[in-house]
């Protein structure tokens, strides 16, 4: 049957029920927010262009370019973890486009005293969200704590760190090598960083390598936490999607700990992005931690529909000689069989249909079959 | 049907050199050598499709997934900052991004510096890092005449041999960054066509090692 709902709507429904199953409650919010919130946290936003307007009381307001900041702003430090999800439109300039776009974004946040189970659960839900989108997906997972401790141990100068992180995110081992050589880093340590850059593999392959390559340079506590969280997903049905890939590096001023990005075969960039953002919580004067992710629903329009060769299954033609109830009956009879019907007096231009029927008196005439 | 690896090649001499490297890496497509105006070439047996695009567009094709991999100049990557993986410096098409001006140029720091360039992003980032206030003038070509006609104080442009500059009485004042051709990959393609991309990466690295 022809697919009546678009990919984005179908996925949004599936995600909503998935998050509900794990006790996350929907968080509804206004489309507006005080502009000041974004001015103070510009680097957290994907693009720093924001649609602003002056409210009746003279306050400068903005159409939300992001949801997480508003959720954090309205959160309170609590003894239990607040589990929320949202399905909202945001307004921002996407890269390469020269204007603002309205983008549907679905996401999930856990705020409060988050523990390793919380992190595992969010990773599981991120992977299952990808599975709801397509059968061919990958979830790249990294840990910014590992990266930070490693660069500290190796002694990368502070002014080179931002560049180093950029090269890691690009898997750019040639420029990383040049940068480290310039900074006087030892050859064996540069080799280690090159390994880090080129690594992209399943937990079964990469976790044992990490133990041997990184112990001594990264604390056992950090390595164990990463290991435990990833291993806790064994047998969950999503473990095959996981790749450990250190090129996932979100803004180190906001994120810490586990970070991840989801990819779907056929869609050019990441469709899902998230991680632990305790640092943003500190900036917003919250004592607790937080982890979450967002799914960029606007990208799903490009997913191929399983069967979108036809706009409608049947075009049902009628004329003034046919009684109203006969047309109604015929249309209803077809839809009851799961066949979509477009009843018209003439065939609309540019429409692709599987079959063409015509009602003549009490009979249905078969005119065309394109199936 | 076998999935195809889509490769965007930059039109021109660099593209031809790079194609030879892809061919050696196990992805030949003999029809590409036929002299005609076609832009897309396929070798279904090897599962590869090549296409010629404007050199400055390669990064866009790769970032948006129309090409899985491609070869682009570092100047383009710095200017457009596409969200891609930069896997290898091919060491081809070597040149540098430089600041050039008339021979008698003296930087008067009391005034805003007028900079003519095709690479506005690179030029602004460079002067921002120096804390210098500039007025960017975006031009699409013949940048060299801007200082001569008094349109700008300096230019930021690619310098290969320096002949064009010399002929227009300009001198290089500063090198911003060395430039060469890079092998780039789409992030999603790297996840799903990783083994083919890795094969190319390894072979090209080996070919460069051999030619050293």
Image: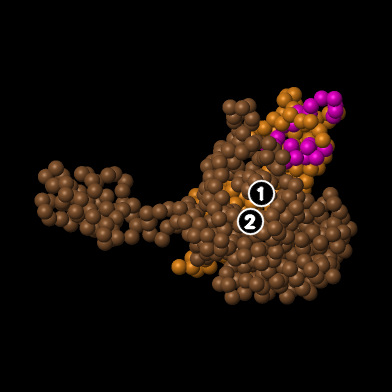
Chain colours: A brown, B orange
Circle 1 SS class: loop
Mark 2 and mark 1 lie on one chain; the one further toward the N terminus is 1
In the rendered structure, which segment of residues is drawn in magenta? B107-130
- What residue did someone put label 1 on? A75
Residue A159 in picture, x, y percent from top left? 84, 49
Q: Answer with the quarter of the image where residue A122 lies.
A: bottom right
- Labels 2 and 1 touching (C-beta < 8 A): yes
* Residue ID at (54%, 53%): A26
Q: Secondary structure at mark 2?
A: strand
Q: Nearer the viewer, residue A259 or B137?
A: A259
Counting other residues with Cα less than 10 Å from the Cα at mark 2, is it few (<14), some (14-19), or many (20 or more)? Answer: some
User: Would you call the spot at circle 1 few (<14 residues within 10 Å), some (14-19), or many (20 or more)?
Assistant: some
Q: State the image coordinates of residue A256 (x, y, percent, origin top left).
A: 74, 57
Q: Is residue B43 visible?
A: no
Image quarter of residue A115: bottom right
Tell me which residue sits at (68%, 69%) in the image: A229
Q: Nearer the viewer, residue B43 or A23?
A: A23
Which residue is drawn at the image coordinates 56% and 63% (left, top)?
A22
Name the disc covering residue A310, or none.
none
Residue B117 magenta-highlighted = yes
Magenta segment: does it hold A240? no
* Residue to which mark 2 is pinned: A82
Name the foreground residue: A13 vs B136.
A13
């Amino acid at each position: 049957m022809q697919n009546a709902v678009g990919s984005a709507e179908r996925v949004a429904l599936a995600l909503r029920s998935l998050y509900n199953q794990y006790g996350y409650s929907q968080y509804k919010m206004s489309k507006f927010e005080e502009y000041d919130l974004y001015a103070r946290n510009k680097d957290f936003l994907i693009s720093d262009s924001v649609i602003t307007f002056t409210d009746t009381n003279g306050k400068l307001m903005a159409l939300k370019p992001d949801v997480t900041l508003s959720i954090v702003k309205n959160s309170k430090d609590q003894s239990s973890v607040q589990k929320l999800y949202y399905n909202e439109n945001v307004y921002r300039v996407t890269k390469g486009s020269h204007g603002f776009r309205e983008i549907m974004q679905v996401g999930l946040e856990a705020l409060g005293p988050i523990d390793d189970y919380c992190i595992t659960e969010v990773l599981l839900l991120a992977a299952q969200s990808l599975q709801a989108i397509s059968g061919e997906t990958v979830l790249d997972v990294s840990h910014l704590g590992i990266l930070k401790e490693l660069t500290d141990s190796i002694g990368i100068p502070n002014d080179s760190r931002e560049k180093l992180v950029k090269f890691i995110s690009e898997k750019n081992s040639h420029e990383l090598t040049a940068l480290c050589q310039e900074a006087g880093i030892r050859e064996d340590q540069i080799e280690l960083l090159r390994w880090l850059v080129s690594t992209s593999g399943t937990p079964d392959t990469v976790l044992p390598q990490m133990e041997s390559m990184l112990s001594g340079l990264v604390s056992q506590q950090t390595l164990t936490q990463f290991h435990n969280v990833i291993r806790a997903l064994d047998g969950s049905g999503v473990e095959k999607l996981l790749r450990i890939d250190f090129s996932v590096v979100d803004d180190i001023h906001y994120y810490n700990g586990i970070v991840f990005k989801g990819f779907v075969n056929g869609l050019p960039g990441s469709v899902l992005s998230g991680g632990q953002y305790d640092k943003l919580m500190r900036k917003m004067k919250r004592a607790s931690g937080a982890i979450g992710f967002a799914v960029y629903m606007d990208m799903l329009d490009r997913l191929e529909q399983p069967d979108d060769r036809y706009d409608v299954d049947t075009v049902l033609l009628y004329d003034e000689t046919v009684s109203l109830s006969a047309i109604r009956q015929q249309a209803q009879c077809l839809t009851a069989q799961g066949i979509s019907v477009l009843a018209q007096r003439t065939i609309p231009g540019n429409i692709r249909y599987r079959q063409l029927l015509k009602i003549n008196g009490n009979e249905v005439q078969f005119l065309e079959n394109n199936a | 049907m076998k999935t195809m690896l889509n490769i965007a090649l930059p039109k021109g001499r660099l593209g031809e050199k790079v194609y030879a490297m892809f061919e050696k890496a196990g992805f030949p497509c003999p029809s590409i050598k036929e002299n005609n105006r076609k832009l897309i070439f396929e070798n279904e047996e090897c599962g590869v499709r090549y296409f010629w695009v404007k050199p400055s567009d390669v990064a866009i094709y790769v970032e948006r997934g129309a090409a899985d991999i491609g070869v682009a100049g570092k100047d383009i990557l710095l200017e457009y900052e596409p969200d891609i993986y930069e896997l290898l410096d091919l060491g081809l098409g070597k040149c540098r991004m430089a600041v050039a001006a008339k021979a008698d140029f003296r930087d008067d720091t009391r005034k805003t510096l007028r900079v003519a360039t095709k690479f506005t992003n690179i030029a602004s980032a460079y002067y921002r890092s120096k804390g210098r206030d500039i007025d960017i003038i975006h031009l699409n070509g013949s940048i060299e005449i801007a200082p001569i006609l008094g349109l700008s104080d300096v230019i930021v442009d690619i310098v290969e041999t320096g002949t064009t500059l010399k002929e227009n009485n300009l001198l290089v004042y500063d090198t911003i960054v060395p430039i060469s051709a890079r092998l780039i990959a789409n992030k999603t393609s790297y996840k799903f066509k990783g083994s083919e991309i890795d094969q190319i990466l390894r072979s090209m690295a080996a070919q460069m090692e051999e030619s050293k």
